[in-house]
Amino acid sequence: MTRREMLKLTSIGATGMVIGASGLGSTMNALGYELQPSLDDNQSVKNKIAFYGRHQSGITSPLQGHIYFAALDVLVESKEELRQLFKLWTSLTVRLMNGEQIVEPSTNGHIPPTDTGEAMGIDASNLTITFGVGPSLFDNKNLNIQHLRPKELMDLPHFPKDQLDEAYNGGDICIQACANDPQIAFHAVRNLVRAANGKVRSKWSQSGFNAIPRDGSTPRNLFAFKDGTVNPAKNSEYNDSVWIQSGESKSWLVNGTYLVYRRIQMHLETWDRTSLHQQEATFGRYRESGAAFGKKDEFDDFNELEKDANGNYIVPETSHVHLARLAKQKILRRSFSYSSGIMSNTGAYDAGLLFISFQKHPQQFIDIQNSLGRNDKLNEYITHRGSAIFACFPGVEKGSYLGEALFTNL
């Protein structure tokens, strides 16, 4: 069915309405997508995470088993159209996180179902949906929002060993959907993008997974080492490292954060031929316990500059942990593994890490990456293929909508 045919069936064509700045909301209603700013979190739903709050979900929420991450470019031609789009996404996101279909099912069999339906019969699965905006959005002259761009919201610099593929870089908007069911995460992004038909264009996307230990301990990456050991754990640490405070950036970002995305291919075949001792020396940690060299427990603190009786660093000076620690920066890692088949030109696994970190200033990540530099022994086993950065809005209070503080500053 063509779009023209669908418009006729929903009477839009007959009434002469067009999708424009002032008509987007009513047009979306006619298509079946409803702007419902008063929707509530339904706390009675099984495996439900709240949508409303000071911060967006999917940042400090308990880590789920699956992710579907999408970067989009906008096609809207005005800031009002963009505002209406985020208002629509707000309503739809509340429903999705309640474990509901994106709209109430229609009895009109002459038009395609508005919800694609693959999530029917599955609970909310701890779905979280996180939205961010990239540097390129502010370069769009049609939107006239250049003056609202934080000076620190810049494309990440080139780092040693980067071999970036444009197919996995950048984007005007990101949608991160995480859930304990992969189909729930995919369904969320699929339907949000579908609802924005003609307003956004998919740029790239990537699915990922995590193995969450039953005891709630730190998950392991595909090299079998724990990932996220030194994450912030207290509210004060989140405020110091993750959440943007008043006066630290543009006012519309207070209680928001910056998301850094890196698609890192892990050369599993090479790693699997490396001895356990060399693997552990690469990280500077023991594989089994996750403890730093010279320590017993994963969370035992250590001094990266401490030396043994022979004057050698206990944690090797080319190890990932040693070099990262030298940067004196803290970030919140919320990464997932990925596996995207085989690379046809080499026959090697196209698999690795979807590195995702949250920090109140991009410089925190940049300092760590620069400290790793060319000296990081892990470089022998990884290649960075994708890179992006997004400013994540603060959370939404009931009656408000995603990014409202940005648009009210226009």
Image (cartoon, grey):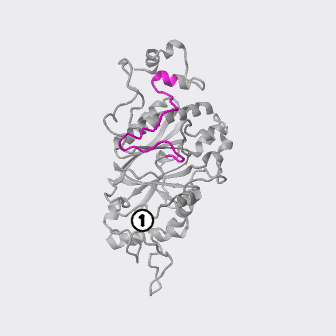
Q: Residue furthest top?
A: 14
- Main secondary structure along the magenta-highlighted residues: loop
- Kind of residue at badge 1: Glu
Question: Within the image, what quadrant is residue 142 found in?
Answer: top right
| Residue at left offset 41%, top offset 41% | 43
- For residue 212, side relative to residue 260 (left or right): left
Q: Which residues are magenta?
A: 27-56
Find the residue positioned furthest to the bottom: 309
Percent from the top left, x then y, of residue 405? Answer: 62, 41
Q: Is residue 99 magenta?
A: no
Q: Secondary structure at mark 1?
A: helix
Q: State whether residue 78 appears in this view.
A: no
Give percent across and percent down for residue 145.
Answer: 65, 39
Q: Which residue is mark 1?
A: 380
Location of residue 248 with respect to 78 vertically, above or below: below
Query: Can residue 236 be seen here?
Result: yes
Q: Is residue 104 left or right of residue 15?
A: left
Residue 331 pos. (x, y %): 51, 59
On the image, the x and y values in percent for residue 155 come to 58, 50
Q: What residue lies at 53% left-to-right and 43% top-to-bottom?
A: 171
* Number of residues whose C-alpha sits closer than 10 Å to that of mark 1, classed few (under 14), some (14–19) or many (20 or more): some
Nearer to me, 198 or 213: 213
